[in-house]
Image (spheres, grey):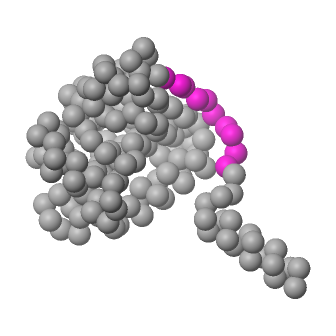
Protein backbone atom coordinates (compact mmCIF):
# COMPACT_ATOMS: atom_id res chain seq x y z
CA UNK A 1 0.00 0.00 0.00
CA UNK A 2 2.83 2.42 0.84
CA UNK A 3 4.46 1.74 -2.53
CA UNK A 4 1.18 2.38 -4.30
CA UNK A 5 0.69 5.70 -2.51
CA UNK A 6 4.29 6.72 -3.19
CA UNK A 7 3.91 5.86 -6.89
CA UNK A 8 0.61 7.74 -7.06
CA UNK A 9 2.15 10.79 -5.41
CA UNK A 10 5.09 10.68 -7.82
CA UNK A 11 2.74 10.46 -10.82
CA UNK A 12 0.66 13.35 -9.58
CA UNK A 13 3.62 15.63 -8.94
CA UNK A 14 5.39 14.75 -12.19
CA UNK A 15 2.17 15.13 -14.18
CA UNK A 16 1.46 18.46 -12.54
CA UNK A 17 4.92 19.78 -13.39
CA UNK A 18 5.76 20.21 -9.73
CA UNK A 19 9.10 18.41 -9.98
CA UNK A 20 11.86 20.93 -9.32
CA UNK A 21 14.29 21.54 -12.16
CA UNK A 22 18.02 21.92 -11.63
CA UNK A 23 19.23 25.47 -11.12
CA UNK A 24 21.89 25.79 -13.79
CA UNK A 25 23.11 28.50 -16.09
CA UNK A 26 22.83 32.24 -15.62
CA UNK A 27 20.04 34.67 -14.80
CA UNK A 28 19.85 38.23 -16.08
CA UNK A 29 17.27 40.39 -14.27
CA UNK A 30 15.90 43.63 -15.69
CA UNK A 31 13.32 46.09 -14.38
CA UNK A 32 11.65 48.74 -16.51
CA UNK A 33 11.61 51.58 -17.01
CA UNK A 34 15.14 51.77 -15.57
CA UNK A 35 16.78 48.86 -17.40
CA UNK A 36 16.82 48.40 -21.18
CA UNK A 37 14.76 45.20 -21.30
CA UNK A 38 13.79 45.76 -24.92
CA UNK A 39 17.46 46.12 -25.92
CA UNK A 40 18.35 42.95 -24.01
CA UNK A 41 15.62 41.03 -25.86
CA UNK A 42 16.77 42.39 -29.23
CA UNK A 43 20.39 41.43 -28.48
CA UNK A 44 19.35 37.91 -27.43
CA UNK A 45 17.26 37.48 -30.61
CA UNK A 46 20.25 38.62 -32.65
CA UNK A 47 22.30 35.73 -31.26
CA UNK A 48 19.78 33.03 -32.20
CA UNK A 49 21.36 30.25 -34.25
CA UNK A 50 18.45 27.89 -34.86
CA UNK A 51 15.00 28.82 -33.59
CA UNK A 52 12.83 31.34 -31.80
CA UNK A 53 9.48 30.49 -30.21
CA UNK A 54 7.37 33.38 -28.92
CA UNK A 55 4.31 33.44 -26.67
CA UNK A 56 2.94 36.98 -26.58
CA UNK A 57 -0.03 38.62 -25.00
CA UNK A 58 0.65 41.68 -27.14
CA UNK A 59 3.45 42.56 -29.57
CA UNK A 60 3.71 46.20 -30.62
CA UNK A 61 7.44 46.84 -30.17
CA UNK A 62 8.91 47.77 -33.54
CA UNK A 63 12.42 46.88 -32.34
CA UNK A 64 11.41 43.38 -31.28
CA UNK A 65 9.36 42.83 -34.45
CA UNK A 66 12.34 43.94 -36.54
CA UNK A 67 14.65 41.56 -34.63
CA UNK A 68 12.22 38.69 -35.30
CA UNK A 69 12.10 39.59 -39.01
CA UNK A 70 15.90 39.76 -39.15
CA UNK A 71 16.20 36.37 -37.44
CA UNK A 72 13.83 34.88 -40.02
CA UNK A 73 15.90 36.48 -42.81
CA UNK A 74 19.03 34.83 -41.31
CA UNK A 75 17.31 31.45 -41.65
CA UNK A 76 16.05 30.99 -38.09
CA UNK A 77 12.78 29.15 -37.55
CA UNK A 78 10.58 31.81 -35.93
CA UNK A 79 7.08 30.94 -34.66
CA UNK A 80 4.65 33.01 -32.63
CA UNK A 81 1.68 32.25 -30.39
CA UNK A 82 -0.52 35.16 -29.38
CA UNK A 83 -3.74 36.02 -27.60
CA UNK A 84 -6.49 36.40 -30.21
CA UNK A 85 -8.53 38.93 -28.26
CA UNK A 86 -5.58 41.28 -27.80
CA UNK A 87 -4.85 41.08 -31.51
CA UNK A 88 -8.46 42.03 -32.24
CA UNK A 89 -8.45 44.86 -29.66
CA UNK A 90 -5.14 46.43 -30.62
CA UNK A 91 -4.74 48.46 -33.78
CA UNK A 92 -1.00 48.64 -33.04
CA UNK A 93 -0.30 44.89 -33.09
CA UNK A 94 2.58 43.95 -35.38
CA UNK A 95 1.46 40.33 -35.70
CA UNK A 96 -0.22 40.85 -39.11
CA UNK A 97 3.00 42.39 -40.43
CA UNK A 98 5.07 39.48 -39.10
CA UNK A 99 2.63 36.92 -40.53
CA UNK A 100 2.69 38.67 -43.92
CA UNK A 101 6.49 38.41 -43.79
CA UNK A 102 6.33 34.62 -43.52
CA UNK A 103 6.51 34.13 -39.75
CA UNK A 104 3.89 31.56 -38.69
CA UNK A 105 1.48 33.02 -36.13
CA UNK A 106 -1.06 31.02 -34.14
CA UNK A 107 -3.82 32.58 -32.09
CA UNK A 108 -4.87 31.18 -28.75
CA UNK A 109 -8.63 31.05 -28.35
CA UNK A 110 -9.16 28.45 -25.64
CA UNK A 111 -8.40 30.63 -22.63
CA UNK A 112 -10.03 33.75 -21.22
CA UNK A 113 -6.58 35.33 -21.53
CA UNK A 114 -3.42 33.85 -23.08
CA UNK A 115 -1.21 35.98 -20.86
CA UNK A 116 2.15 34.28 -21.43
CA UNK A 117 5.13 36.48 -22.22
CA UNK A 118 7.84 34.06 -23.25
CA UNK A 119 10.60 33.83 -25.83
CA UNK A 120 12.62 30.68 -26.33
CA UNK A 121 15.84 30.98 -28.27
CA UNK A 122 17.50 27.79 -29.53
CA UNK A 123 15.33 25.86 -27.06
CA UNK A 124 16.64 22.44 -28.09
CA UNK A 125 20.28 23.43 -27.53
CA UNK A 126 22.32 23.15 -24.29
CA UNK A 127 22.81 26.94 -24.27
CA UNK A 128 19.11 27.67 -24.76
CA UNK A 129 17.70 31.02 -23.65
CA UNK A 130 14.35 31.44 -21.88
CA UNK A 131 13.02 34.98 -21.65
CA UNK A 132 10.01 35.53 -19.39
CA UNK A 133 8.47 37.87 -16.86
CA UNK A 134 5.68 40.42 -16.70
CA UNK A 135 7.21 42.32 -19.63
CA UNK A 136 4.86 42.59 -22.62
CA UNK A 137 6.62 43.00 -25.95
CA UNK A 138 5.47 46.62 -26.25
CA UNK A 139 6.85 50.15 -26.22
CA UNK A 140 4.83 50.90 -23.07
CA UNK A 141 6.41 47.97 -21.22
CA UNK A 142 9.80 49.58 -21.71
CA UNK A 143 8.98 53.27 -21.43
CA UNK A 144 5.93 53.68 -19.20
CA UNK A 145 5.29 50.54 -17.16
CA UNK A 146 6.91 48.94 -14.13
CA UNK A 147 7.80 45.51 -15.52
CA UNK A 148 10.26 42.72 -14.84
CA UNK A 149 12.15 40.46 -17.21
CA UNK A 150 14.27 37.37 -16.65
CA UNK A 151 16.70 36.07 -19.25
CA UNK A 152 17.67 32.53 -18.26
CA UNK A 153 20.57 30.96 -20.14
CA UNK A 154 22.11 27.50 -20.07
CA UNK A 155 19.34 25.49 -18.41
CA UNK A 156 18.30 22.89 -21.01
CA UNK A 157 15.76 21.19 -18.72
CA UNK A 158 13.97 24.48 -18.16
CA UNK A 159 14.01 25.31 -21.87
CA UNK A 160 12.56 21.87 -22.67
CA UNK A 161 9.70 22.41 -20.19
CA UNK A 162 8.92 25.78 -21.76
CA UNK A 163 9.17 24.36 -25.30
CA UNK A 164 6.86 21.46 -24.40
CA UNK A 165 4.37 23.97 -22.99
CA UNK A 166 4.72 26.16 -26.10
CA UNK A 167 3.98 23.18 -28.33
CA UNK A 168 0.98 22.14 -26.21
CA UNK A 169 -0.46 25.64 -26.63
CA UNK A 170 0.32 25.73 -30.37
CA UNK A 171 -1.42 22.41 -30.90
CA UNK A 172 -4.51 23.93 -29.32
CA UNK A 173 -4.35 27.24 -31.23
CA UNK A 174 -5.59 28.39 -34.64
CA UNK A 175 -3.28 29.53 -37.38
CA UNK A 176 -3.73 33.23 -38.02
CA UNK A 177 -5.24 32.55 -41.44
CA UNK A 178 -7.95 30.42 -39.83
CA UNK A 179 -6.43 26.92 -40.02
CA UNK A 180 -5.92 24.75 -36.97
Q: Quadrant of residue 45?
A: top left
Q: Is residue 179 visible?
A: yes
Residue drawn at (74%, 77%), measured in percent from left and top?
A: 8
75 lies above or below 37: below
Residue 48 in the figure: left or right of residue 69: right
Residue drawn at (32%, 45%), measured in percent from left and top?
A: 56
The answer to whether residue 29 is magenta is: yes
Viewer-proximal residue, 32 or 154? 32
Residue 151 screen position, x and y as percent: 50, 31
Q: Locate the N terminus and report the quarter of the image it occupies.
A: bottom right
Residue 55 screen position, x and y as percent: 35, 47
23 lies above or below 32: below
The answer to whether residue 46 is magenta is: no
Magenta stretch in the rendered image? 21-30
Residue drawn at (61%, 29%), measured in percent from left and top?
A: 26
Q: Is residue 74 visible?
A: no
Q: Which residue is the extreme one toward the top? A: 34
Amino acid sequence: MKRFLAALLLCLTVGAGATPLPATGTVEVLFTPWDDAEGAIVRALGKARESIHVQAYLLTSRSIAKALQEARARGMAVEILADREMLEKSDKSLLPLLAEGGIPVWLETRYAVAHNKVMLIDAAQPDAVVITGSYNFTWSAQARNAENLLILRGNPALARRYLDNWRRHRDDAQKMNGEH
